[in-house]
Amino acid sequence: MIILYFYCNLFPQNKFDKYTMRAIKQILAGIFAGFFFLMLGLIGYFYFNQEKIVEILIKEVNKQVNTPIDVQEVSMSFFERFPYVSVKFDQVTVHGANKTDTKSNDTLLTAQSLFFDLDLKTLISDKPQINRLAISNGKIHITIASDGTTNYNILKSAPSENTGKQGKLAIDAIEIEQIQVIYEDRQKGAFYVNQISEALIKGVIQKKYWQLNTDITLTQTNIIPEAYNFFEAYRWSGQIFKSQELIDWKGTLEGDNKQLKINGVFNLKNNQAIIQSPGMKLNAEFINKILAKNKLGKLKISDGVTKISQLRYTYKNKNNQYLSFGFDASHKTLLKQKNINITAQGRFNYRSGRPLIKINTAEAAYKGSSVYFEGNYNLPDQIIKGFTSFTANLKDLNDFQISDLPVKNLTGLIDGQAQVNAKLKGGQAYSNMFKEGELGFQNVGLVIRENNFQINNLNAVLKASPKNINIEELTGNFNQNNLSFKGQIDNLFEYLQKKQPININGHAHTTNFNLSTFLLLSENSKNSEPFRLTDNIRLDLTFEAKNLSRDKFRAKQVKTHFRKYGRRIEVLNLQMQTSDGSISTNGKLLQQKNNEWYVELTGNLQNVNVTGIFSEFNNFGQEYITSKNLAGKLTADVKADFVFYPDFSIRPESLYLITDLKIEDGALIDYKTLEALSNYIDVEELQHVKFARFENQISIQNQKITIPYMEVQSSAIDLGLTGTHTFNNEIDYQISVGLTDVLFRKLRRKHQKASAKQQNNKMMVFVDITGTTEDYNIEFSKLKRKRVEPVPEKQQKKKFDIEFGDFK
């Protein structure tokens, strides 16, 4: 009809008249009616002869197979497989060909339904032929027993009575729908499960020979390890050949719209499979699946392609598998919303559950920073070994806002190369990262988060080994102080991960060192937060400075051994020259949670200018006797403990001090206590009292200065002094004066007899001065006071006891 329609419309002159068209329609209607009655007759024939057809089919199947088949019901089906006429087996069980263990026969196949689609031309004869076999909703269990026998050779090996040939399943096609296929090798411990959603198999199956064309879709399989099973469904289309003990195949494997051409062979005798492929291309979406499967989901690929080449897979058993393929990747990855360009070439190897990536070359680049690597990456243990070189513009790192780092505000360049041995965790981590290598710092700047300590213009050459990093030369500005350093660093990478403290050992030296700016105390460096020691930096350093300053204090040729552990500091053998003399001391400092410091020290001063040392130390926090009141050379042994406020000023109530001191070539100038005697002794002589030498032991405790009795002898006047002086300027002194050293007329005559005594062949006058430095009383005393001595050290009870642990 279609041909007639086009013929008439293309060539209108050839149109049939209405009588011709009517005749044609009648002929076609007759043909259709004849076809209908023919089909009806065939169906009627099959219906009335279905028992005979079923019986013949069952007899033919039994001729081909050598194992029992259990069937719940057998029937003819005219419409379920239309246009095929089929024999349907319901609830089918096909038993295994051989007895695979001593207790029972293994079941080869169970199925809800099994259809035999018949060749219509052969149904009239006594030898109906099967065109197609359809199996649905069931399980195929292929078994190799512990003794090596199999259950799948169900075709008879003896010649058939009718064909004279070996058992042969000669059908056009096998259809499979929703069948679970289990392969179990009890001899070698292999067990694999595959879910076939649909399959079409065409060809010939004999006992010793197969030749099949296949189209199979798998939705589940455990042949591929879960970590590397990246497709939800696999489709295999190709050819399978079996001859003797080998099964060969070639075709195409598809998954998620990706095609992989493969060929392979399976040796039934030794259970070994070999699969090969020229390769395929993987897009960013698929690479992200791989990363997620291997717990690297934080790394997201946004663009690019990976080429897989020379794929080879060898299988013997579940404990002996080998997969290998080459890769050439070019991608972009998003990290903190920043694009990083990644290129890599290498080979992936999977052997017996141990995947390993051999990286021939890999590079990641972002702006002015790049990292190059070649080596191996062990996926299960996340261990990376190999060689790396890198250039890092630290400003680029600021773009990623890595809050986990203990430093911030990074600037400058770091470059280097190293042999790497690192254990990764969650895409990061470094434990003994560098086996050996070199690092270079160029004008690096950073701020330590914990205490806002600033480092600028850091330049260094470092050599890394598994245990430490050796610093051959380092220079930089540390809180506005230029320092040079040589030494070594331990646990650098553990410190960057906030896992372990960093250990720094070595020697630092500088020309000029300002302690105020270093400790963030000066006005131009002061921070909103006080200086705070970090718990995770440990130091063991020797230090030298040609010049050291702190406010008014100035020192030269400073040397010390300095150790820091947590929030504890130990200063060993600190030596310096200051105020025309020298100071040596040892001390310990402990910073508390409130940022105050407990300090304990012992020291020695040699020939120090008293005026200078009082001036440089701001008169030690008191105003009673200042640098303007003293002159001379001071030599002293000092023991002290006290508390510093966060700004490094002394908390007065905490101070305990005891010192044995000696002043030579000294003078008391405008000393208020002596001025109190102005009504009794010539004022001019008391304004500037010179003496050759005096010695005493002075102590400070509970905000009180205790001065045992001492004598100050000079050509102008002999004085004796003892008493106490508090930090609130409350005074309680007794001063003794030799009468022969003053003008006798200056003594009030009414007191002469009462106060005169004979002492060392001199007549002495004792004067008590009490009150405050601003409001005091003066009284003559008839008796010399009992000596005021410092509390013996073994009886001293310090207000602030400080305990220091061992420095480890």
Image (spheres, grey):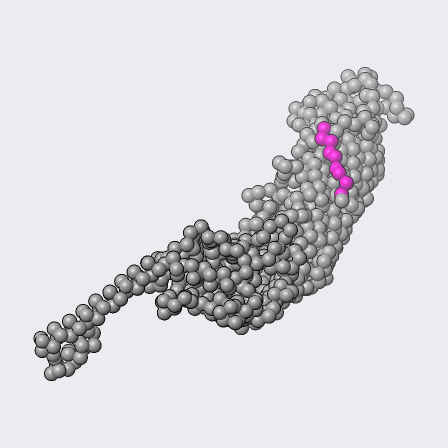
Q: Quadrant of residue 151?
A: bottom right
Near-viewer residue (230 or 362): 230
Quadrant containing the C terminus in the rendered view? top right
Horizontal arrangement in the rendering, residue 441 relative to residue 543 (left or right): left
27 vs 616: above or below: below
536 vs 269: above or below: above
* Residue 612: x %, y % from top left: 73, 44
Taking the spot 54% from the left edge, 50% from the top edge, the residue there is 403
Taking the spot 79% from the left edge, 46% from the top edge, the residue there is 573
Q: Is residue 531 magenta?
A: no
In the image, farthest residue toward the left: 18
* Residue 797: x %, y % from top left: 76, 27
Q: Is residue 334 visible?
A: no
Highlighted range, magenta? 799-807
Horizontal arrangement in the rendering, residue 466 relative to residue 445 (left or right): right
757 vs 402: above or below: above
Quadrant containing the N terminus in the rendered view? bottom left
Q: Main secondary structure of the magenta part?
A: loop
